[in-house]
Each structure stands twice: as structure tokens, then as C-alpha cells.
Image (spheres, helix red, strand yellow):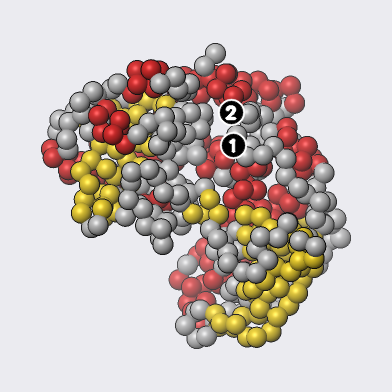
Amino acid sequence: MRPIRVAVVGGGPAGIYAADILTREHEGALVDVIERLPAPYGLVRYGVAPDHPRIKEIIKALRRVLDNDRIRFFGNVDYGTDLKLDDLKRFYDAVIFSTGAMADRALNIPGIDLDGSYGAADFVSWYAGHPDVPRDWPLEATEVAVLGAGNVALDVARMLAKPAEEQLVTEIADNVYQGLAKNQATTIHVFARRGPAHIKFSPMELRELSHSPSVDVVVEAEGFEIDDAGQSAISAHKATKLVVDTLLKYLEAEPTGAPHQIVIHMMHNPVEILGEDGKVVAIRTERTAYDGTGKVTGTGEFVDTPVQSVYRAIGYLSEALPDVPFDDDRGVIPNDGGRVLDDGEQIPGLYVTGWIKRGPVGLIGHTKSDAKETIDRLLTDIDSLPEPEAPGALAEHLAARGVEFTTEEGWGKLEAHEIALGEPHGRERIKVVPRDEMIRISRS
């Protein structure tokens, strides 16, 4: 196979895994990972709650990939403004888009635009120290609703229920700690449309809810329903059984009287957010029932739960990229196994991987097999790929445009700085949030 240069647009796990697989399977491949933010790792750095210790191991693995001499990192480079598709075609044999999904999926119910109604992705970006979101977050509500039955919903509920002091062992940024220290929430209601066997929590995430001595986890007995399809899922999948068993333990446990509660309501479908004077005052849900196929339908019985804020955690959504086809209904770049398609026809040299390829489903580990499929397609096509006019000229192009890009070496400087900030406080690191400060440290 001839030597090739490949650009990976998006520096999260999907893009880094693609770069890793390509350089391992093709000795002549050189890869540039291009990231909009000054630091790599995408949702691992900016989409995961700071109290998840296992994420550290994923970061170590991703760091080892970026240490590869045949992989370069270019941060603080925005595709579409700093860099156009025509530029990438001039510099590279192929381009892999792996920009993931950072926006909140819409929930079209009355009251969704009330003051106090938020997208979970925005809240996650705030508490994860994303540089492009406001530094403050309103946390005056004492009763909160979280809509969704996945791990993001659990993260949001736990971050709202857990006292700020318990986060001081993590990499939490100072502005986030100060915000959480003012949090007034005492009761967090989590609403799921279906029952325990169809809920999308992972067992570990669910167990972590009760790790704080300041939080009681309560499962409502009404709604703890398992239909035939659910029973089959329990028998067939160990993870489903573990989730159901954990929910059952919470259901049977006696509350300890902890100052904060996370209350899980199953078989509830949100239908309206109620407001007064433009502000959230309650969430209205409709009780659901199984229809015999594993799906649920409304029963016509409605329940109003007093809350002062609502977070929708019903999924992430990818955003369209300039000059690249996009399926607005599915929220993905149209593709065949990773080959980008335009009206069903392959676009030579363009590929896609990760959530923007298949939608925001699955855990981080799933992106490895996803990237492998895309790289297999690319390597199959290698002899037909158009050769670039100016291979390897990205750095010169960005410098000529005045782009203050960061590098893998610069990320090492930023990481060392964050670790040094944490050392006096006995913490592994303290995350730097302002973009300009991240760039200054990285380029020092």
C-alpha cells in the first residue's frame, strides 16, 4: 500500500481510535488529528462527570495513542472557518470526520422554553469545564426533574444531589465548585418512560448513585413493572439483570434520612412543563403501560410533580458540518460502513466514524469497533484515493492564517499545569477553563 496522509476532524475517542487503528494497520500512514478545542479527548474531558475515576484510564490510553510519532495533534482549529474542506483535500489523501455529538436532542412538549428548563448537555458542559459555555449556572431550585433513562440522566441527578465538598477530590474547575456550593437542590426526580428491564442505565452508573452518604436513592414502587419482553431481556443480558437487581435493592431499602434524595419514577412519560410567570413550577407526566410488544402507551392518568427546574437528558444530537452531506432526521453524515455518501454515491476520500456516523448510542468502547470498520473501508479504497497537492502543509497553512493552534506538546504543557494546580490541594489536577488561558499555557 502506498504511503498516505489522513486528516481526522475531531479529537475525541472516536477520532483518536481511528488514528490509532490506521497507523497500526498501515505502516506508511501519517495522521493529523484536528480538534476545535485547545485540548483533546472530546466527551471524555467535556462530557463526563468529574467523579468518574475510571475515565482516567481511558485518558491514559488515548494519551499513549497521541504519543505516536506518526500522529500529530492540532487543537484550537475550527473546521469550517480556520480550515475548509477544499484545504483538507489539498493536504490529505483522505479525511475522516469524527466530530461526535454535543447538542441536546429536542423535546417538543409545552413549556419546554420556560425559565428553568435546560438541556442536560449544556449542564454537563458547564460542570465539565467546557471553555465555550457560561461560567455560571443557576442552581436555586430545591426540587428538580431529570427526564431520561440513560447514564447522562444519572450523571446530572448525581451532580445535582451530591454536596460540592465531595467533588473536591476531583479535577472540578474552581468556578464549577463555587457554583455547586450554592446549589439549593434537595430532591431530584428522575423520570423514565418504561420499567426497570428497559431502562438504559449501566449497572456501575446506577450503583454510584448511592456512594455519597449525603444522598438517599428512592425507587417508586408504582411503575416497577416487568413485562414478558423485559423478563426475556433479564434472562438474556447480565447487565439488564444487574440493573434490575440494583433498582430492586433501592426499592426495598429504608431511607437513611440523608439531606438529599434521588427519586426514580418509572412508567412516566413527560407531557408538559407547567409554569407561572414564565418560570417552571411543575412537571406533568402521563403514566404508561406496556402494550404487549415491549413498548409503552399512555394510560390517560396524569401526575403533576412540583419542581422549579427541568433537565432533559433524552439524548445528544450531532450538528451538520460545512460542505459535508448531513441527514437532519437521523442526525448523522450519510455513509456506508464509514464511506461518506451524497445521494447514495460515495464521495472519494471522505469517511466518518463515531456518533456522527451512527448516532449517539453506545459506550466509549463501542467507538473502537466503529473506527475499525471505517479504517477497513479506507484501506480498501487506498489505491483509488486522489493524491494531495500539498501533503503535510497544514501547519504552514494555519500559521499563515494567524490561527493559534495547539499541539500534542502544548497539551502536555497544559496537562502539567493542571496537575501542578491540584498538587497543593491533594488533588490529581484542577481543570483550566478559559480558552485563552488554555491557549496561552499550551503555546508558552
At x 53%, y 67%, the residue is 240
Determine which residue is flagged by label 1.
132
Q: Secondary structure at mark 2?
A: helix
Determine which residue is flagged by label 2.
435
On screen, residue 362 versus residue 311, left or right, reads left
At x 51%, y 28%, the residue is 38
User: What kind of residue is marked 2?
Assistant: Arg
At x 63%, y 85%, the residue is 299
From mark 2 to mark 1, how far is it between C-alphas? 7 Å
| Quadrant (top left, top right, bottom left, bottom right) of the C terminus | top right
* Frontmost residue, 2 versus 309: 309
Rendered view: 337 above or below 421: below
| Quadrant (top left, top right, bottom left, bottom right) of the N terminus | top left
Rendered view: 301 above or below 144: below
* Frontmost residue, 72 versus 50: 72
CA neighbours of label 2 inside 10 A, class few (<14), some (14 to 19), many (20+): some
